[in-house]
Amino acid sequence: MHIFYRVLTLTLLTASLLSAQVVPTPNASAADSKIEEMLKTISPDSAISFDRTLAGFGTRHTMSDTTSSTRGIGAARRWLYSKFESFAKDDPDFKVYEDRFLLQDVPFIPKPTTLMNVYGVLWGKEGVNGRYIVISGHYDSRCTNLLNDTSDAPGADDDGSGVSLVLEAARAFTSTHFKPDANIIFICFPGEEEGLYGSNQFAGEARKKGMDIIADLNNDIVGSIRGGNGEVVSNMVRVFSQGYQELKLGKREVNADMIGYSNDSPSRELARYIHTAGEKFLPMFHTTLIFRQDRFLRGGDHASFNKYGYAAVRFTEPNEDYHHQHQDVRTVKEMVRGKEKEVVYGDLPQFVDSAYVASVTRMNSLAAALLSISPPAPSNDVMLVDKLEYGSRFRWDNPSRGKGLAGWKIYYRKTYEPFWTGYVFVDDSPDPVVNYDLKTMTKDDYIFGIAAVGTNGVESIPEAPLPAR
Ligand SMILES: [Zn+2]
């Protein structure tokens, strides 16, 4: 089986018209087996031990103690740094970083506070000017009162689970000597609860430096399988993605509604990519795509990446339990369905499921691995709308001119459908600009997405080509 191929359902009409054009991509067993080796290394025991250590710092409140070696956010960030350093011993391409910045006179941070983003970068062949993939979580925690920086706030699920995932993914990539083309950043943010401060700092600096971040995979509350609604789901994670954002940044400014692209923002194409990859490589564990940026009344660090024009998604468990989020640790006698019961409040490690954290870690690591060895997405891809006609014409730049790609896939789906339902394969070409005329399908009735396909069979994220005359 070649990599990242999904059985695509063609409608009867298009199947009869297009079957001659559908060509499978080349075999990619070498890439497949390297990814599978890395995924197998991901361990529930390792992930849960990270989570217990994080919860053991008592509180990781953004303004909590920084001098103690056992309690508070200072101890937690020094431990995170040391974990990343231990992974760096396994892989000389993995480097550890901390970015410090001072916050003053900002909402919910009433005293001058130095925050620190702690991260490791697995440097790929593309180097500093190449593409980046980010796997993120936030290491700060909170109790009931957002300003209380001393009481216990173990934050085992929110977001010890996401940070444990970041660490476990970094451990898996480095210990199996996975060699990406694009760079992979494994990052832990502080200041999320007060206002996404760590991620805002990082994504803002990245935008200033012109970093080509192709995806942020943000993980926030990815540890529990049991919801406060009584539901238990262990084989699914929700993936939230924003539609076209109000703030127009980056190259793809578009009136998305007018051209029917509301569901084809870079973040939603990324979400589909993750879903398709998961169904192929991790068929026992599923993603449910939620086409909104986040849950009501909530936010997360992926929003900072969106704000600066980057594709980003949020992973969150299917059923949350609000007794175990943003709550002081306490046991209270309450009437539950007519009976007095002892109800435990607080974000405690016993409510985090080790196998579940490992499953979500695999989904993240799979997506990051594929993206890191994928070819760059097509550049300057457009759909030509200069005249009335019955087909659809596309054009994109081809800087490699017949060297380095297997070709491209033009994915399609009806405008009301959530997932791509088929594709047309276009062979690589020596031409500097590729023109493709898809005579059998009208652009009025379909959404298209163009992906580059590498000689290793791995694909870029499809991009919906903007209309051009
Ligand atoms: Zn959170």
Image: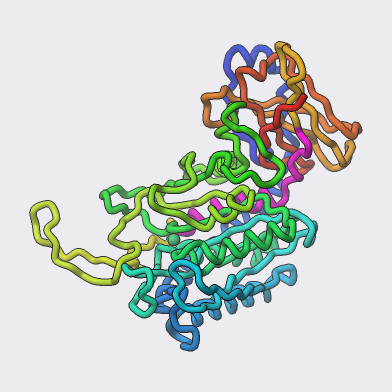
Image quadrant where residue 168 sits: bottom right
Q: Residue at x 83, y 33 (%)?
A: 428
Where residue 107 appears, x then y in whole percent?
A: 46, 66
Q: Quadrant of the N terminus?
A: top right
The residue positioned 77% from the left and 55% from the top of the image is 130
In the rendered image, residue 284, in percent from the top left (x then y), is placed at 47, 44
Secondary structure mostly seen in magenta is helix
Q: Would you say residue 380 sits in the magenta stretch?
A: yes
Taking the spot 59% from the left edge, 76% from the top edge, the residue there is 81
Q: Is residue 290 visible?
A: yes
The total of numbered circles placed on residues is 0
Q: Is residue 350 visible?
A: no
Q: Nearer the viewer, residue 252 or 264?
A: 252
- Report the residue at 58% width, 39% height from top: 244
Q: Is residue 292 magenta?
A: no
* Quarter of the image where one finds residue 406: top right
Figure quarter occupied by ligand 1: bottom left
Q: Which residues are magenta?
A: 357-381
Q: Position of residue 232 (x, y in %)?
A: 32, 49
193 relative to 356, above or below? below
Taking 31 as reference, is 286 left or right? Answer: left
Q: Nearer the viewer, residue 181 or 68?
A: 68
Q: How is the image coloured?
A: rainbow
Query: Which quarter shows the C terminus?
Result: top right
Task: Indicate left or right for 32 with 150 as reference.
Answer: right
Q: How far from the left and from the top, in percent, is residue 439?
A: 74, 14
**Which residue in the rendered view is the most extreme toward the front?**
105
Snapshot quadrant of residue 116: bottom right
